[in-house]
Image (cartoon, coloured by chain):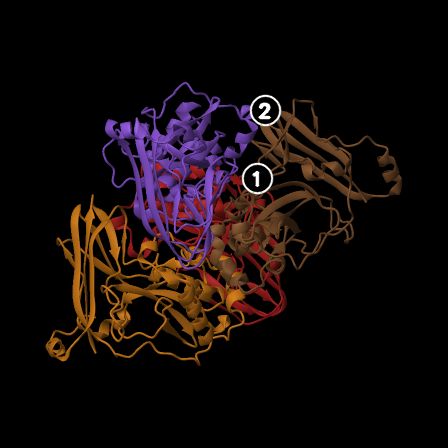
Chain colours: A brown, B purple, C red, D orange
Amino acid sequence: MLIRLGYDIQFDFPCATPMVALLNVHPSRESDLVEPGHVAVSPEIPVTTYLDTFGNRCTRFTAPAGRLRLTSSGLIRDSGQADPINWAARECAVGDVPNEILIYLLNSRYCEVDRFSNIAFDLFGNSPTGWGRVQAICDWVHEKVKFSYGHARPTKTALDVFTERIGVCRDFQHLAITFCRALNIPARYATGYLGDIGVPAGGPMDFSAWFEVYLGDRWWTFDARHNVPRIGRVLMATGRDASDVAITTSFGEANLCHFSVVTEEVGTEEAAHADVAEPAAA
Amino acid sequence: MLIRLGYDIQFDFPCATPMVALLNVHPSRESDLVEPGHVAVSPEIPVTTYLDTFGNRCTRFTAPAGRLRLTSSGLIRDSGQADPINWAARECAVGDVPNEILIYLLNSRYCEVDRFSNIAFDLFGNSPTGWGRVQAICDWVHEKVKFSYGHARPTKTALDVFTERIGVCRDFQHLAITFCRALNIPARYATGYLGDIGVPAGGPMDFSAWFEVYLGDRWWTFDARHNVPRIGRVLMATGRDASDVAITTSFGEANLCHFSVVTEEVGTEEAAHADVAEPAAA
Amino acid sequence: MLIRLGYDIQFDFPCATPMVALLNVHPSRESDLVEPGHVAVSPEIPVTTYLDTFGNRCTRFTAPAGRLRLTSSGLIRDSGQADPINWAARECAVGDVPNEILIYLLNSRYCEVDRFSNIAFDLFGNSPTGWGRVQAICDWVHEKVKFSYGHARPTKTALDVFTERIGVCRDFQHLAITFCRALNIPARYATGYLGDIGVPAGGPMDFSAWFEVYLGDRWWTFDARHNVPRIGRVLMATGRDASDVAITTSFGEANLCHFSVVTEEVGTEEAAHADVAEPAAA
Amino acid sequence: MLIRLGYDIQFDFPCATPMVALLNVHPSRESDLVEPGHVAVSPEIPVTTYLDTFGNRCTRFTAPAGRLRLTSSGLIRDSGQADPINWAARECAVGDVPNEILIYLLNSRYCEVDRFSNIAFDLFGNSPTGWGRVQAICDWVHEKVKFSYGHARPTKTALDVFTERIGVCRDFQHLAITFCRALNIPARYATGYLGDIGVPAGGPMDFSAWFEVYLGDRWWTFDARHNVPRIGRVLMATGRDASDVAITTSFGEANLCHFSVVTEEVGTEEAAHADVAEPAAA
């Protein structure tokens, strides 16, 4: 399957403002890119990219005062397979968790693990361990929290989600991640493209948040917001929580004035065209 | 100057419990060690060490049920110089902050930068930038917050410190770090040994927390708790906040039953003895 | 001056639900009513009224399942004078505050006085006392907090307003009230009608929140949201904060489906008509 | 049964400070007083008493700079009966709750009812209603929260208790009260004397907090801290939460320097003596 990816994001900056964008396909998916889809910045300004400590490809620049436009259009090969399910996946004992994954057991800005140990144990302490426990967490969050665009706010933490029971996709994942960590299951936040492939159309195309859980000896995809296996996730970034992997982080005032995302399966004709496109740069 | 370092920390574990300890001298100070002072664990159990993503040397093991004792005794060469002061140190424009240091501008568990932008700007927006601004922050925190052992708690954030105005050393540093980050000055949390060298004795020897600020092109030591240059800090770990660099993190119940620290200047006689000791292992 | 008052508020109730409404003109203004403007409830159901401990006239009923409509239309005589200003009004020493007013110095749900003592003293400790200090508080809140309908939420406290600096009228007043109380100045929350009399039209007519401060030996009106003297406030209720005097409190699910308010000056012709209307019931 | 009551409470005031004390036996128990036990203030200063809006007898004065001592010694007749248990007590439908009791269904400073609706329903929505539901709440709080003098703090709310699961008696009651209100059961905070009558001695004598629940047509005593019927409670005050009925509220700095309480059953000999004492003033 081929998926067309892209966005058109525009900001107004009252003055020159440094910015970091996580708007690239994740390095783990770069080899799938048929058309690379670099970040195009207009007006043309110096842009650098780097890998952060979580392994994400970041784009960095100083936006001049005025309108700034970030666009991209790429094409990626995808397995077309839905998120794998593996009820046999077992928890990795904390003592066996790889060193570099231990941080995904700790507190972070939006995931107050220290305030959730008792709550998580009360709710899920009797669930089977491993995949079943994570699925029980997703079921609970999916059932108890209501989706509402109007209830997003930048300071909302897992505890706020737990008490308010309403929010956007990032809120669902923060709560589920916090439950996992409180039960000593490593979990991290993920962002990327998620289209409507294989499901009824759900409104304008958009980025989405989901989360990953370390079971057995690898990371698995979970999504407490949708809570069904989905086709066509294209990972952009992973981190402890949304604070680490904000789509854009601006160090100063930035007023979003346009935001549109494309992420859709493309048919064979466009595919044929795409196949002759230049290979993706690594 | 030579400083004798060590500790005797004991826990009771109701059952086998994985643990990570940041109880080693920081890699940046290892070459100063005259006697290495490894972590000794009793009873003898398998122990591994690794560097975490912040560059700290971590000790990792699974404590068996019962009493566990962690001890160490080392000797380190120190410049004997107090923390440097450099009023000429200028802020590094965010656009020039090295990639790997950008995370020290972001939110973390105990440092809710997103809730402090306005507060920090109100309080320090008119201070001179650079060293002077950081010093203004330290002066404010030092003056406004009262030290009290009885007012520590694991969930206390910078915002709690700001409203309660009382706490222990970590609380002082969390608030100062958060102010710095909210003003786009990279700041990180530091822990280590800090004795009474050059100051009146201040009670039992202990570890301490301070913080580091990136000004110009390097990190500088600040300490909103003491707010005077001190001699003899021996760094153990740096991270975003206390959640990243807890002295010990246990994944299960751990009851502290003994805690003592040694950190004191030693005279020439002991120094002479120490000089013939084996060189520190890297 | 005569002011036409009224509303049309409709809810859908999934099941029978007890409700309390504070939708009457405050007893202190009842004698000004030319047309009484009782709460009309449709469908017709048993309704009782009572005075709560704060002296507000409450309407109480159990809404049946389905649509419920609350309407009212009244006419009130008003002085046409703007909120009085009295720079000479002095603080009432706490020792002289009447017994029944002491509770307006204490904590309430949205006014965490205990967390604001230091913040308030830092900000306003050097302001002149009395009227000047309250005005300094209003100026600060008015300048620092931005109005935005999109940033209301039921759990938002004064501390949230202080950090987020954005909200609706109730948020402005909660923060100002909390500052006052933290400085030992009695302050209470007020709701009522506030039209655009004497000011540029500001959108749809609505209820509004303001607050009252006890200075000298009486309560005075302040409004940190508008921060200019206004004509035509018609008080409905006062209490500790919005939790005490919610326009409607439902003990179960209630879905607001229509909300409109009328509050406008009426000309002489309608006035002439009104004058022959029956006198208001006490 | 006769119970000797009294206290000796001392403060140091850096400057003259207004204070309100709730240190009198509640009006509902005044007729049981064999010896009245007025509040004695030393040095002698003007003192007034009044009933607050909750019906408590308050003592009010302005403490001069220096040491202030509040003492009392009284004797009260008590039924000697343990707190009544009535499994048949039914919930009062919200629509039938008396007007003046409705406020005990609302938010207060330490009882964030608005944040607990879902949590309470998740935990207790399937419990039988009435007495059984309140008892289920007490059982839960008593089992889940650990008592610890070291974990009191003035800003601790029900939500903090719910996440931290540790605290003092007021914390237990705040959480239980909040659960009740979130389930539409009126609940209020109570303070008073509680000795060790009929139970093993539990340390120094002290005041205690418990709570009252409105079931059927009256208030009943519950105590999530002890969670067993107790003999010899002597009520001093009720209110929404500890903010309303703090033992002492000082409007300025007050440093507690001595605190002792007496509350113990007295034998027949002292009783004989007591019976000839003057009758209690109303």
Residue C252 appears left or right of D218: right
Percent from the top left, x then y, of residue D269?
11, 78
- In the picture shown, does residue A193 fall above or below D223? above
Residue D8 appears left or right of B92: left
Q: Nearer the viewer, mark 2 or mark 1?
A: 1
Which residue is painted at 17% across and 69% down in the image? Answer: D74
Which residue is painted at 21% across and 63% down in the image? Answer: D261
- Protein chain holding label 1: A
Q: Circle 2 sits on which residue?
A: A16
In the rendered structure, which disc, 2 or 1, sits on the residue that comes first in sequence? 2
Q: Are marks 2 and 1 on the same chain?
A: yes
Q: Circle 1 sits on which residue?
A: A244
Viewer-proximal residue, B132 or D28?
B132
Percent from the top left, x then y, of residue C59?
50, 64
What's the amino acid at mark 1? Asp
Q: Secondary structure at mark 1?
A: loop
**Where does the C terminus of chain B fall, quadrant-wise?**
top left
Q: Is residue A280 visible?
A: yes
Viewer-proximal residue, D38 or A129?
A129
> Label 1 neighbourhood size at 10 Å, few (<14), some (14-19), many (20+)?
many
> Label 2 neighbourhood size at 10 Å, few (<14), some (14-19), many (20+)?
some
Percent from the top left, x then y, of residue D186?
43, 68
Task: For the residues labelled 2 and 1, say whether their Cβ atoms are less than 8 Å apart.
Answer: no
Q: Is residue C244 visible?
A: no
Q: Quadrant of residue D5?
A: bottom left
Residue B41 appears left or right of A148: left
What's the amino acid at mark 2? Ala
Task: Report how far apart the C-alphas of labels 2 and 1 lie in the structure.
Answer: 23 Å
- In the picture shown, does residue B184 fall above or below D17? above
